[in-house]
Amino acid sequence: MSRCGWFARQVGWWTLLECLMLVGPPSLVHAQIKIEVPEPGGAGLPIAISPLKSLDSEGGGRRLGEEFADIIARDLDLSGLFKVIDRGAYIEGPAGLSLEEINFQNWSALGALALVKGGLSLDGDGVTVEVRLFDVAQRKQLGDGKRYRGERKDLRRMAHRFADQIMLFLTGEQGPFDSQIAFVSKRGGGRAKEIYVTDLTGLKVTQITKDRTLSLGPSWNPAADKLLYFSYKQGGPYPYLVDLLSGQESRLYPVVGYSGRWSPDGTMIAVSLEQQGNSDLFLLSPEGRLMRRLTEHSDIDVSPTWSLDSRGIAFCSSRSGSPQIYVMNVNSGSVRRLTFRGDYNTSPSWSPKGNLIAYTSRAGGFRIMTIDVDGGDPQEVTAGEDPSWSPDGRYLVFSHGGRLYIASKDGRSVKQLTGGRGDDTSPAWSARLK
Amino acid sequence: MRSARAWCWWLSSALLIVLTVSGCPKKPPPPGEAGFGGAGGVGTSGGMGESGFPPPGETTQKEIDLGPERGGPLQDIHFAYDSFELSSEARDILRANATWLQKNAQAKVEVEGHCDERGTVEYNLALGAKRARAARDYLVSLGVAPERLSTISYGEELPLCKESNESCWQQNRRAHFLVLNR
């Protein structure tokens, strides 16, 4: 709290309120409910997620109510913080939405400490969902209930949003599940690689490119409605931009390139572009115009990734004789080497919540590592390649053996996101959806 | 090999169909954007030169003629892991390739740089570009006109051999010479 006090003196009372909000929920929740804040990779907080009760007689409601529960269960499993109790064991049905109506003994008998219950009503194509989280032992509601309204197709996002709320109530920080992951896959068959986007179930997959060539290296804009990628469809590979809402595609700066990332403030795109066989880093405007050259070196500079304040870039360079991670101050251009262990450290990703940089390291096999941006000992997360941070900075998505996985940043929880159908690589985790 | 051929056949036919149906080549880039140092080139340390960049629209022709990956009149060269250095064996092959190019003076060649699967995609694309360039530069030093040689990197995306062992990786770490016309 002393930090909050300092901030408050500096910039006014409203900041104090914000600090209280940030600090408040975990301790409050902790005091009230005596549920231990779960840790990744632990036994997991036992939670029951009841299918939503359909508040009218229409038949489709039941299936939607189950789908809603399935998505929350999937999200909470991916978090590594929860043990979702199997629905087949539930004694009580979907009915009973209020404290008075719920028989908490039916849930404590299953070992559940937390319980999700809710209802949905259908109105033509419209859906309204009301959903609540309960502390089973204390027989109390946790936080406010939530009401979501939208079309049927929005039901999945409503579920992801409530999963994020459950994470907020029980860990003090909103979850990362109302977001999307872009990746490259050969799941369409043949040698063609296309860009796909999935929600956090890994099951609702949308194919973005249909060029039947090699499309590589997807990267999100901060609003999570556009993707930058590199494609061989006109030779190249050249950088392209696709607007996911309109489907409209444009070509960015028409020079061969291999990787690009949007700055978090949305004003710049850092790209590695090739000339005469060598790749260097450049800044493009969001419309694809060349703004500035960042590096001019006879060795490989590739895979730029931004700090949250859009002032720093970490990248991979072979300037020391082997690929290593470097950090650059964008304004001054000063560069310092960050990794010194091993002779192959590539594909950095800068955490949106602080000072950690995740990257790929070759040590026997390929491993995901994290290192503090100020230096220090690298920490191994798990086996894999090409990490990308979750918007809350607690998780990494990465590829391993042609499948995508999600790990907690300490590697204690590792969960499979996509199945074995195709060759899924190069995941990029979006910001939270608006 | 079967899959590689199928891929090439498939890509060629698809492109032919696209071109036949649309009846026109892909649009060239808008004027003023064709290279570094043009519009918006506010480089801190100077712009890049403008040479070496065919306008993207021109590459369509090359894709139609995409030949088999293995074979052709010019022999592949191979590289050590994470290296784009030319071995003495690679130099011998490049000398033979240069001799062929001198005898076939109309031929234009695209030098493809490839990597094995070990490593990350973006770094391997940059490494493949280094390999293609090293091979191309050596051919130029042997007297092949630079305008007859273009380069492209495929990184680890188009392996010849799919197994995970050294002999397979060795085959994949290569520069391949695609003859675009004769």
Image: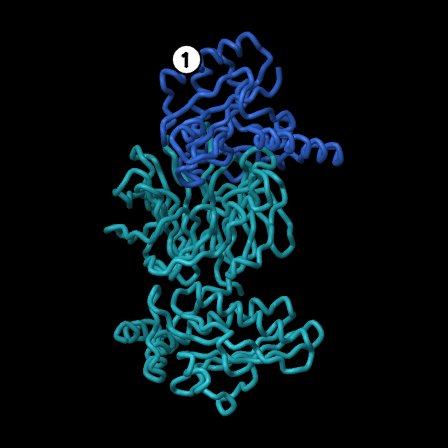
Chain colours: A cyan, B blue
Q: Is residue A129 visible?
A: yes
Q: Is residue A87 above or below residue B14?
A: below
Residue A119, quarter of picture: bottom right
Looking at the picture, tell me which residue is in the foreground, B146 or A43.
A43
Residue A413, quarter of picture: bottom left
Three-letter code for the amino acid on which mark 1 is drawn: Asp
Mark 1: give few (<14), some (14-19) or many (20+) Cα within 10 Å. few
Q: Is residue A62 above or below residue B162?
A: below
Q: Is residue A13 visible?
A: no
Image quarter hosting the N terminus of chain B = top right
Q: Secondary structure at mark 1?
A: helix
- Pinpoint the chain carrying mark 1: B
Image quarter hosting the C terminus of chain B = top right
Percent coordinates x, y for residue B118 in the rendering:
40, 37
Q: Is residue B83 above or below residue A419?
A: above
As drawn, is A126 to the left or to the right of A107? right
Percent coordinates x, y for residue A303 in the rendering:
42, 43
Going by the picture, which residue comes out furthest to the bottom?
A100
What residue is rendered at 59% in x and 80% in y?
A: A53
Residue under pointer 1: B92
Going by the picture, which residue comes out furthest to the top?
B103
Percent coordinates x, y for residue A226 in the rendering:
56, 53
Residue A157, quarter of picture: bottom right
